[in-house]
Amino acid sequence: MISIRIQQLTKRFGSVTALHHLDLTINPGELFFLLGPSGCGKTTLLRSMAGFYIPEEGKILFGDEDVTRLAPHKRNTGMMFQSYALWPHMSVAENVAFGLHERKVPKEEVKRRVGEALESVHMSKYADRRPNQLSGGQQQRVALARALVIRPRCLLLDEPLSNLDAKLRLEMRTEIRRVCKEFKLTTVYVTHDQKEALSISDRMAILEFGHILQVGTPREVYKRPSHKTVANFIGETDFLPGKVLGTAGEYTTVETAVGRFDGLLGDPARMPEVGAAVTVSIRPECWELHRNEEKRNVVRGRIGDSIYLGEVAQYEFVTGNGTKLKIFERNPRFVDGSSRGELYATVEPEDVVVLSD
């Protein structure tokens, strides 16, 4: 297992700067996701790690080795693409063996390692088939086996599941995590799918316009986003603009158009002054509905539209001044006729995130 360290990395394409002085450390054996909207720089960063792009400034280190300007084939990285990139005229076994033949590995060892790689992704019985005889999920397993067979120092995945249907994506998520952990591979995984990142990553970095906005575990990024962009990109949230009234211990008090909230700073290093404009972020599932008024972090209103989904209901909660909030309630109580009348929505201070504008 190796670490991957990015130090002050800058990459330009003509007059466009795709990566701005990035610093990032990926720990040995970590399944690390690069996440963000199209054009944020995540694929450029991954391709720089692979050696397909050479940065103008900064360093890329695999362990203690500086690989910044090393040719791709000398970095010994395993790469998976969203298009699978399998040779159509070769069998499954021949596709997997291709990288070993390029490295002049002896025939007997090639046969053994190909067998082990196909076994690890449960594709041994398909060794003699051609790619066009396989499903999308099976082709992706072959691509994974091909990346693993060369015994790479790290695994680089570029949106590997984007061409699969929803059911196969769920299946392959678990499979990729299992294989990465079984082989103890440091893995960097690019995606725009938030649920994919939340479900299997150890940590993730959220990028925007070539800058890293936040690095953390799935829970840290979801529960305590440091920027409005992060809160908006990862999951759903209610945003309420407001002004800071003051602080007490770890909590910051904010006055909004729908009420006063105590909450935690998304980025404790950016302490807003009293009177500063901020945005309060509250996840829809963090609200609780009551018939009686509570004392802290409370909003009064009525349920407008509602969608009943069995174990959960999604409400449009309309406040007294017309502001509409999204509220998700598990084991729904306020649907049909029970939703009539005035209700009070409350939220715990630990679930209120105060974001500097």
Image (cartoon, rainbow, N blue to C red):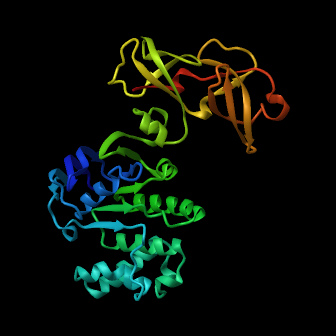
> As displayed, is residue 344 above or below residue 209?
above
> As displayed, is residue 42 above or below residue 329?
below
Residue 1 percent location from the top left of the image: 29, 56
Name the residue at 38% across, 56% down. Answer: 189
**Nearest the eye: 37 or 206:** 37
**Image quadrant containing the C terminus:** top left
The answer to whether residue 271 of the structure is visible from this angle is: yes
Q: Quick check: 60 left or right of 287? A: left
**Nearest the eye: 16 or 124:** 16
Name the residue at 44% across, 50% down. Answer: 201
Residue 121 percent location from the top left of the image: 47, 71
Residue 48 percent location from the top left of the image: 24, 58
Q: Quick check: 145 left or right of 73? A: right
Q: Residue furthest right?
A: 337
Residue 133 percent location from the top left of the image: 53, 84
Q: Quick check: 332 left or right of 123? A: right
The answer to whether residue 219 of the structure is visible from this angle is: no
Name the residue at 25% across, 85% down. Answer: 106
**Nearest the eye: 41 or 5:** 41
| Quarter of image, res 190 | bottom left
| Quarter of image, res 305 | top right
Name the residue at 48% across, 80% down. Answer: 124
Number of residue marks: 0
> As displayed, is residue 313 above or below residue 107?
above
Q: Quick check: 88 left or right of 108? A: right
